[in-house]
Image (cartoon, rainbow, N blue to C red):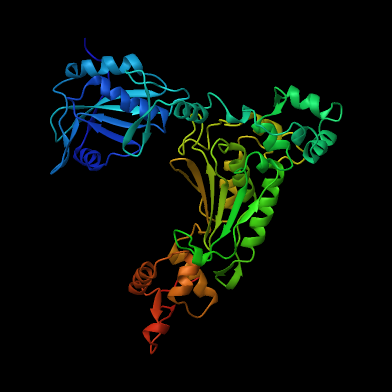
Amino acid sequence: MTTNLVVNEINSASTQKILARSEGHFCDFKAKEVSPAKLTKALSAFANADGGELFIGISEDPQNGNVWAGFADEEAANGHIQTIEKFFPLGTHFRYSFLRSSVRQGLVLLCEIDKTPDIRAASDGIAYLRRGAQSLPQKGPEEISRLEYNKGISSFEDKIINGDLISISESQSIEEFMNEVVPFSTSLDWLKKQKLILDGRPTVAGCVLFSDEPQVDLPKAAIKIYRYKTNASIGTRDTLDFHPLSIEGDAYRQIYDSVDKIKEIIEKIPTSETGGLTALQYPTEAIHEIITNAVIHRDYSINDDVHVRIFDNRIEVQSPGTLSGHVTTKNILDERFARNPKIVRLLNKFKNPPNKDVGEGLNTAFEAMKKLKLKEPIIEQRESSVLVLLRHEKLATAQQLIIEYLRLNNEINNRIARDICFIGSENAVKRIFQTMQKQNIIERIPDRPQSRAAYRRGSNFPKI
């Protein structure tokens, strides 16, 4: 049998880039001698996590690092390909090709795997999950349930809780909702029809949407807000401005109350702009959409709150649970998948719904940041959570910001430059000053001690 896979020719530079990579969450190397059955474990792990690349024909050498040791020809890889395609056929989620290097002997088989919408088992019948550089077997009921939640095969929002029926059927939340949205029905009948009540008990979705105090039955379904008076990478107890605030209540109130509180906090944070100290500014739309996204798409089966950390130069919003379904950090602005479809759908029925444009929230946040000339949000997936980072960092370069400042002020020092450029490192700013000095854009003010060093406009300072 002869394979029909594409053979891609790569040059020396591309070869070195591949060999320089490290095994990790998105990359794995296997020697060509590895059994084909073991390869399916790696493919299963990538498919059940966030996708990745598997290179077959690159071996690890403790002394020389990764070594290119590929197949003699395409036919030599037939055994591997047949086994792999039996469990992971070519198609939407799996792509296979050969790499031929201009400076190394042998063909490397590259398997590119996307995150799949279903659970994929290896040839031993076990589903694996990629965590770091490991492919971990998922055998226990809890592990399988967690995979099903992450894939959207089942939803924790449909689980029945032990709370009292009247906690959602006679709450103030449901009363206000019924008067505004469904005045022609009774709350009990409507909740049953929407399957928010099952077997005479409220579901998680029912509790999240319509209980006045859902945290009684779901203790970690709140939003915690922290204010750290620092721009360091990690907040500490010493830099914590006040005891963390806990925003509770149903999902609708949580979203609006949290956004109001975050706005109140950030408006009290001073920042050095070109004309002096002003209040820190973030677009309200961006904060609103990211908080909404955290509340409606979080994994309620994880016993943790949504955490909002407000620093001097950024806001971090961390929500429990990895990205669900086929969504990844790369396609999140284009793909749509709701972990909690009932919560998403029914929250949109509220008066002035927080999720007005269903599926467009993060796109709105990105656009709002651009309008304020701030850098776009960063989305990171961690082991059991998703972190969204709103940076108060201008799109302009550091040099442009320094020039803009000096147009309105007679001098600038390292501290002010760090503030307006949102650079934490004193040495990084020193290097920027040195570059600008060499170009005569700025010059150091003479006869000042090192502790009071400052700079003014130079002979090549750009004119307006």
Residue 440, position as x, y percentages in the image: 37, 75
Which residue lies most toward the top here?
A: 1
Looking at the image, residue 353 lies above or below residue 160: below
Q: Nearer the viewer, residue 348 or 218?
A: 218
Looking at the image, residue 324 lies above or below residue 272: above
Left or right: 384 with respect to 81?
right
Q: Quadrant of the N terminus?
A: top left
Residue visible at 53% across and 62% down in the picture: 228
Residue 398, position as x, y percentages in the image: 44, 64
Left or right: 115 with respect to 108?
right
Which residue lies most toward the bottom here?
A: 447
Q: Nearer the viewer, residue 159 or 288?
A: 159
Residue visible at 53% across and 60% down in the picture: 311
Residue visible at 15% across and 42% down in the picture: 62
Residue 210 figure quarter:
top right
Task: Determine if residue 196 is in view.
Answer: no
Q: Nearer the viewer, residue 187 or 313?
A: 187
Which residue lies most toward the right here?
A: 184
Residue 100, position as x, y percentages in the image: 20, 29
Q: Nearer the viewer, residue 255 or 327?
A: 255
Residue 11 figure quarter:
top left
